[in-house]
Image (spheres, coloured by chain):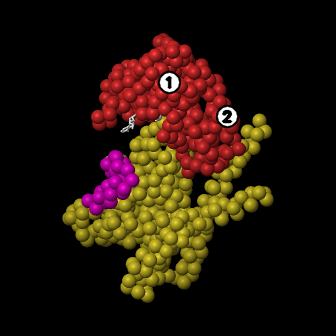
Amino acid sequence: MSAALLEVEGLAISFGALRAVSDLSFTAARGGITSVIGPNGAGKSTLFNLVSGALRPQQGRVRFAGADVTGWSTHKLLRAGLSRSFQITNLFFDLSVFENLRLASQVLEPMGRALLPVARSTAARDRAEELLGQFGLAEKATELAGHLSHGEQRRLEIAVSLACRPKMLLLDEPTQGMSHGDTQSTAAMIKGLAGDLTILLIEHDIDVVMNLSDHVVVMHQGAKLAEGTPAEVRGNAEVQKAYFGENPGGETPGGEAH
Amino acid sequence: MAEAAILRNAVEATERIARGGRNLLAGIFVAIALAFAVFAGMTGDTFFFRLATEALIFAGLALSVDLLLGYTGLLSLGQALFFGFGAYVSGLVLKNVAPSFWAAIGITLAATLLVGTIAGIISIRARGVYFALITFGLAQVAFKVVFNTREIGGSDGIIGIPQIRAEFGLFSVDTQSPAGFFLLTLAFMMLLYAGCAYLVQTPAGRLLVAIRTNESRVPFLGYSPWRAKLFAFVAAAVVAALSGSLYPMLRGLVSPELLAFQISGNAVIMVVIGGVGTLAGAFYGSAILTMLKSVIGTFTEYHLIVIGALFMLSVIFFPKGLAGYALPRLERWVARRRGRA
Ligand SMILES: Nc1ncnc2c1ncn2[C@@H]1O[C@H](COP(=O)(O)OP(=O)(O)OP(=O)(O)O)[C@@H](O)[C@H]1O
Ligand SMILES: [Mg+2]
């Protein structure tokens, strides 16, 4: 068994003349946290779209858990154990918090229960209840997801992507717009998830990146600028120039996303 | 542990109350229909029995529209295609194959599974307004084809479809008996309603609601929205066709107009008046529209104008339809009663 759960090789996609991702290769080690950083528009979310099957790469290959999954549909990838969250909260806003989680947990049920009363889907129900507790949303269970505060919606976003018990989770700026306290607790939670779970993380908060990551990939204008341990990346002169240099404080290079 | 139990109770109570409200709404409709049957039966009326039976049959069509629109978020402007298809298949079976209720229903069901799947594959490639336009176009094409096909009566349709006895083992119902066939149709439509109400509270049905709410996230839950939509489309086609299959039993004839846009459009209006996404609303909408047509039709020739105006007013003042207005009130009542029990 390879140490890498995810292997990306020569991945590329262009939108018209814009080369959003070009010739990108890296691997994400099993059980670790690999972070992808880079300024706004570097192509990080596009990379997630390529890996999660939302976009088809024009070049390159994606290998996941030993299989070539290039061009697989999203739902097939999810059933293979690859899940993701969204930078822009992407929930079922008209449905209750519980129903969001139950829907996301439904894939844990045996197929035969799809046409039985939903009350029989006990595995999905139990998983949803577990996540409500884990993410501090139990009191909001029967409220509409659209009525939650921003911070609560961001937590639910992660919970929904985690519901299917994935092997690998792609987190696209999970702490985006969160308060400082929420950011800290979310970071701690993500750290706790790694191990059984392999995490690929896009994060603008550089302290979070430095604290959490086993490995960091730096993107710039669609291409890989550097990679290595947090310390190596931080010490890299090119990264300093292209990235940290712009913002000596180093807090949130690139500023707020969107 | 206690907290978890409280949480589960809260979630289950909300779902039970919602279900209770819906069942109550359907139950009230059945009660009204039965009261009507008693009244019409006592006065020995035939005309209104037939009209009410027709309203029930069209309510089944509206029910299928609501399954697509209210649960999956797909507006079909051509649902009469399946209604008319069911009516023709049933009429042809009754006239040429066997004058049997079960043969008509069974063959309609099988044929619709095939035709619904093909039409579904064509339609659900498109989204939003394009889906509406494709369903509209498909129904128009089918209308023209039926209209121009001599073998199935062309513009005249098929007449002289025999009256039958629907056999149910212990008893049988003569389609010619106004009261008998009204009650049979009521029971049949309530079965279709129960089937839809059951479906939307299964995980598969909940997935349709997820698609309506936010289709873009559904693949990331591990489901193909395409497959789920095709499933909904075929299920709705079956409901529409089975409703249509009763039409020749009522009228003894079928005509191309059953596939016309007027029928599809009316079904959408019924759903909007009754309440989108409520299922039972389809029955109220159909009853209201049929009543308006026959009452206003006796006073003025311009009943379509009056109905159009009333429709606009109802959309403005009751945007959620009759059932959408009644349901929260019924749910509160159910909740109070449960609270006391
Ligand atoms: N579907 C698309 N069509 C056209 N252009 C796109 C599309 N998706 C992304 N882009 C463009 O590709 C570039 C990379 O975008 P991407 O969202 O991947 O950046 P990012 O690194 O995630 O940035 P941010 O930190 O702001 O989230 C941007 O210039 C963006 O405008
Ligand atoms: Mg992004």
Q: Quadrant of residue B304?
A: bottom left
Q: Which residue is mark 2?
A: A181
Q: Is residue B90 visible?
A: no
Name which residue type carries label 1. Answer: Phe
| Residue B68 coordinates in the image, percent (x, y) | 45, 55
Highlighted magenta segment, given as a residue range = B119-142
Q: Main secondary structure of the magenta part?
A: helix
Q: Is residue B61 above or below residue B182?
A: above
Query: Which residue is located at x 34 percent, y 54 percent?
Result: B130
Specify the quadrant that holds the C terminus of chain B.
bottom right
The tag on residue A244 is 1
Tint applied to chain B in the drawing = yellow
Category of crowding for the residue at label 1, using alpha-carbon neighbours closer than 10 angstroms: few (below 14), some (14–19), many (at least 20): many
**In the drawing, does residue A1 fall left or right of residue B328?**
left
The residue shown at (43%, 39%) is: B224
Q: Amino acid at mark 2?
A: Gly
Q: Is residue B134 magenta?
A: yes
Tag 2–tag 1 contact (CB < 8 Å): no
**Residue at 76% in and 40% down:** B3
Q: Nearer the viewer, mark 2 or mark 1?
A: 1
Q: Quadrant of residue B30?
A: bottom right
Rendered image: mark on residue A74 = none
In the image, is A143 to the left or to the right of A235? right
Could you tell me residue B245's position as x and y percent?
Answer: 39, 62
Q: Nearer the viewer, residue B330 or A163?
A: A163
Q: Secondary structure at mark 2?
A: helix
